[in-house]
Amino acid sequence: MRNWKFAMASTILGSALILGACGSTEESTGSGTETEQTTSDTAGEEAAVEGTVSGDGSSTVAPIMEGIVEEYAGAQPDVQVTVGTSGTGGGFEKFIQGETDFSNASRPIKEEEAASLEEAGVEYTEFQLAFDGLSVVVSQENDWVEDLTVEDLKKLWIEDGTSKKWSDINPEWPDEEVVFYAPGTDSGTFDYFNEVILEDEDLVSSATLSEDDNTLVQGIQADPNAIGFFGYAYYVANQDTLKVVSIDGVEPNNDTIESGEYSPLSRPLFTYANNAALTENEAAYDFMKYTLENAGAMAEAVGYVALPQEDYDKGLADLEALK
């Protein structure tokens, strides 16, 4: 396994991941960015599997999945894998329409999405890939915020018709308006923050929303009055220019995320696979098997937290049962 922490630092700051040395193309469709991996067979070698596999969904899961795609290209050079980042909700829309073989998600599937899949005749299997600690971050130029409570987050992020100032949280902090950055509404990260912090109240209307976590990172880096949130790996890759804020005295790290001590912002990350694709498309089955075999190591490499091995073993058993 390569040094993915170094690789992700440049990947996340860039507009796209350039996958593989044998050739790759990138195209942007709708609100998501799609990275396409194509490779040619090495002279004198025969690939065990041929075909195409397509996925879309969460930008939070993307660092894990994009890393796996690149590694998989070396194992199966005649398989073309495309992975888009339309957000969890946007990915499920494509999954429901039958446009993708798998859908990455930073939250569990919603009841209405499951119902739409049933109506469309799409049977699926949920595979958990890793743990994430949704991270609240500010610029490193911000020298006053170190810790916020859940109640502070509610006061900051819930729309109440007022302009929000740092001094509203602590009178010793600057009398400056807070600048907000948040994932777009198609993002599972937005959904999760909405559930555990906003509790279905409206997000502050002045927030800049983007499905592209790079946009959030760059905006927060540039403004000492900015605050935002996204997946832990994006903080890890940019920790030289961002400062993570502890919540109720607990900072996100591998131990606090895995144990659940970093509450309520610890969460699982998933991919959902189309059962028909797994049984009818040898390439889709092989790629998902490779994903489950390598997700733990890749999660740790890019800044997330691996599951216990027995959870990956269960996922592989569930996959094998579909064969």
Image (cartoon, grey):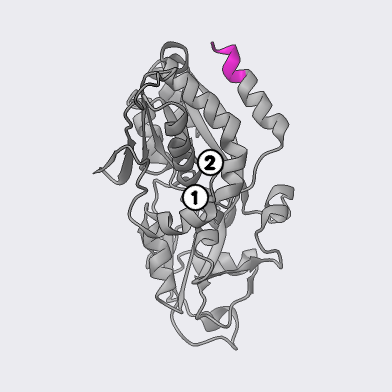
> Residue drawn 45% across and 58% down?
202
Q: Is residue 201 left or right of residue 78?
A: right
Q: Position of residue 12 (x, y in %)?
A: 42, 56
Q: Is residue 34 left or right of residue 45?
A: left
Q: Tags 1 and 2 in contact by the CB under 8 Å rule?
A: yes
Q: Residue furthest front?
A: 44
Q: Amino acid at mark 1?
A: Thr
> Residue under circle 1?
189
Rendering coords of residue 145 (x, y %): 59, 77
Q: Please name whichever residue, 88 or 170, is drawn nearer the observer in this view of the structure.
A: 88
Q: Mark 2 is on which residue type?
A: Arg
Residue ID at (68%, 52%):
257
Q: Which percent across, then down, holds residue 131?
A: 62, 45
- Of the image marks 1 and 2, the number of the one nearer the N terminus: 2
Which residue is the site of mark 2? 107
What secondary structure is marked by label 1?
Answer: helix
* Mark 2 residue element: loop
- In the picture, the quarter occupied by the N terminus is top right
Residue 127 lies in the magenta-colored region:
no
Q: Is residue 320 left or right of residue 203?
A: right
Residue 319: within the magenta? yes
Could one spot residue 108 in this view of the protein? no
Locate the C terminus and report the quarter of the image it occupies: top right
Residue range corresponding to the magenta coloring: 318-323
Q: Viewer-proximal residue, 284 or 272?
A: 284
